[in-house]
Amino acid sequence: MGTFLNPSSDELYTEVFAYAKIYPELTKLITYKKPIRVMNKGFETGIAVPIEYGGVTYIDKQKPKQIRGGGSSLQVQADSYRRTKTRLSDIVIANKFDLFCTFTFATDRQDIKHCKQRMGRWLNHQYMRTGKFKYLIVPEFHKDGVSIHFHALFQGYGGELIDSGHKRKDGRIVYNIPGWRFGFSTATKIDTEGLPLVASYVKKYITKDMPQIDNKKRYWCSHNLIRPKKVANPILFPQDELKFTESYEHDDYDIQIAHEKVDFLSSDVTKKASIHWHEVPKDQRAL
């Protein structure tokens, strides 16, 4: 029988002691030092009943509102950046991107919406000319703080690449993409071993000053990307314990990493739980 802490559950919450995040070639096991509580799927009262927990007021199944006296708008903003970084990291690790690109604009580069539209049209055009490919786009401001450019990760891009005659410090060739005619472009090939470094590199763009697309999105991506599977209160079988060769300790949780896919079972209780990360107290969340 595997290692499993039986969660408690009531009509509203389920206690969660651990999460497993399962990627195609990597698994993270996040174990909390104190159990967290997540709101169960399907909880409805028919009226908006405020529920206070961990300094946050939950109103039925709506997004949480910070209770009075918190002065926590900066905390909410910081938590939003953390979630964005986590989602970006998950996407990068779960997908075998093979090209890291940068796209600049020669004109109207201070118009975020217009730049996004041009980028979108170019992506659609490349789909028609070269076939479908996976992409993740992250905007960044220039040093002037107002002009914008895009960083992108591609997988399976079939468009033309031309050797620019330059190399990066690690010896990788820097290419240009002749199909990009709105400004300057660079592209560097990456391999699977380099993806964790790329994930860290991409996450550094997620700052309080980064541009938002349509006043809400900090990045956008194709619909064909893989996301990690999440399992609450996973059962870890003895034969799988030795697969976790890395471990990191934090104040509120520990993380173990296996450099392969490990499948887990979960209880019927946790299968019925709808996990909303924004409903977990911020001081008990994993990165």
Image (cartoon, rainbow, N blue to C red):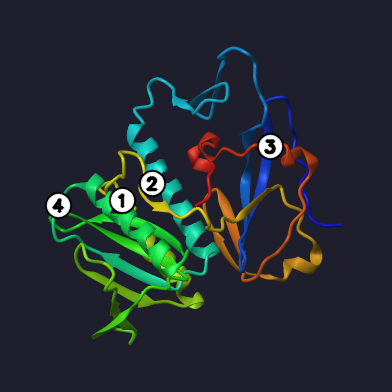
Assess whether mark 4 and mark 3 are in contact (beta carbons under 8 angstroms).
no
Residue 64 coordinates in the image, percent (x, y) = 48, 27
Q: Nearer the viewer, residue 31 or 49?
A: 49
Mark 1 or mark 2: name the one nearer the start of the chain: 2
Q: Can you identify the residue that label 1 sits on?
A: 207
Quadrant (top left/top right/bottom left/bottom right) for the N terminus = bottom right
Q: Can you identify the residue that label 4 sits on?
A: 108
**Label 3 to label 4: alpha-carbon separation:** 47 Å
Q: Can you identify the residue that label 2 sits on?
A: 81
Q: Which picture quadrant has residue 276?
A: top right
Are there few (<14), some (14-19), or many (20+) residues within 10 Å of tag 4? few
**Label 1 to label 2: alpha-carbon separation:** 7 Å
Q: Which picture quadrant has residue 9?
A: top right
Mark 1 or mark 4: name the one nearer the start of the chain: 4
Assess whether mark 4 and mark 2 are in contact (beta carbons under 8 angstroms).
no
Q: Can you identify the residue that label 3 sits on?
A: 273
Q: Amino acid at mark 3?
A: Ala
Q: Is residue 187 above or below residue 134?
A: below
Q: Amino acid at mark 2?
A: Tyr
Q: Could you say whether the residue bearing mark 3 is in a helix, strand or loop?
A: loop
Q: Amino acid at mark 4?
A: Asp
**Label 2 to label 4: alpha-carbon separation:** 27 Å
